[in-house]
Image (spheres, helix red, strand yellow):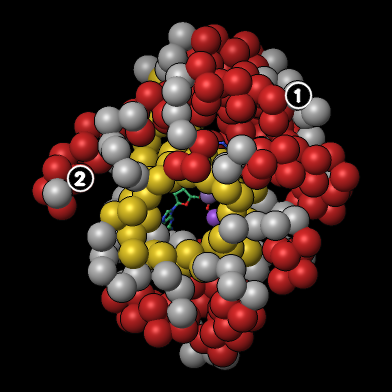
Amino acid sequence: AELESLLKSAISNGAIEAVFQPLVSATTGVVTGLEALARWRTATGNISPEIFIPLAERCGLIDALGSHMLKTSIEHARNWPGMALSVNVSPVQLCNPEFAADVISLLQKRDFDPRRLTLEITEGVLMTNPDQARRSIDHLKKVGIKFALDDFGCGYASIGALRQFGFDRMKIDRSLVSALDQATNGADVLKATISLATALQIPVTAEGIENIRQAAILREAGCDQLQGYLIGKPMSADDISSKLQEQA
Ligand code: G
Ligand code: G
Ligand code: MN
Ligand code: NA
């Protein structure tokens, strides 16, 4: 209960910040987009999003947290013309019937091109509340916002779901990528998954790339976008600005 009230004030006083992780073209290595990730720094250390995101979901703060993240992320992305912006959205937000209209009005107020924005969602919501999820997704897609199915391969989402809900991109979970380092048939499963998505004309991002061998396998298997510590860790907005300057 104490953490809950700390979180509440952290959201309103700006103690929750966005860091950004580069998304690069698999063929050229050029940064084409940035994924915003929430960070909570306190006087006694950082609290992981693995703790405070589920807490926010449980105690009704996720809509406020999500809208804070979207606002700060687009404020920063304004300084990065041409870059795509990805923002994670909780299933709880997507099931709120007001979510879509709130996002659209926020983008309008801040004059941010909806075609630059991708919302990353995990598969859970597609099973628990498919009707509301579909309504929110359809509404947001109409104005040009894109959707990525996050963490693909660590749960039950099927390639069918990708298509049914109109996802624009699939993100291969980093557990599948790290499995490439073991002597199993991990590479075959990955390649088959990527070919299926590619056959449906759904582009694939590989997450959690930590070494050049993984990068080579995934590029070869048809991923058009790579992400991970090898390419770039999540960074402050200032560090991203410098990185983009170098590439320009
Ligand atoms: O950044 P890190 O890898 O520590 O994130 C841990 C988890 O928290 C990931 O599953 C990530 O998607 C999630 N996460 C990070 N930032 C946000 C956010 O702004 N909103 C939501 N819903 N999840 C986030
Ligand atoms: O669930 P989602 O894919 O949004 O989670 C993103 C999380 O993964 C972030 O917390 C980020 O810090 C973490 N992450 C990003 N790249 C890597 C990587 O190469 N290795 C590991 N272990 N974690 C990563
Ligand atoms: Mn994500
Ligand atoms: Na992920």
Q: Nearer the viewer, residue 13 or 112?
A: 112
How far from the left and from the top, in percent, is residue 241?
21, 37
Give the structural element (helix, strand or loop) at label 1.
loop
Q: Where on the image, by quarter, is ligand 4?
A: bottom right
Question: Does residue 125 lie above or below 96 as drawn?
Answer: below
Residue occupying the point 31% across, 73% down? 27
Disc 1/disc 2 C-alpha distance (Å): 35 Å
**Residue at horizontal 57 percent and vertical 77 percent from the top:** 198
Q: Residue at x 61, y 27 (%)?
A: 103
In the foreground, 154 or 126: 126
Vertical relation: 197 (above or below) 182: above
Residue 158 placed where, x, y %? 75, 69
Q: Residue tagged by mark 2?
A: 244
Nearest to N terminus: mark 1 or mark 2 = 1
Which disc, if any, is residue 114? none
Instruction: Report whether residue 186 is seen.
Output: no
Residue type of the residue flagged with mark 1:
Glu
Name the residue type under label 2. Leu
Name the residue that disc number 1 marks: 98
**Res 110 seen here:** yes
Q: Is 27 left or right of 126, judged from the image as shown?
A: left
* Place of residue 23 in the rendered image (x, y in percent of width and height, measured from the top left): 37, 55
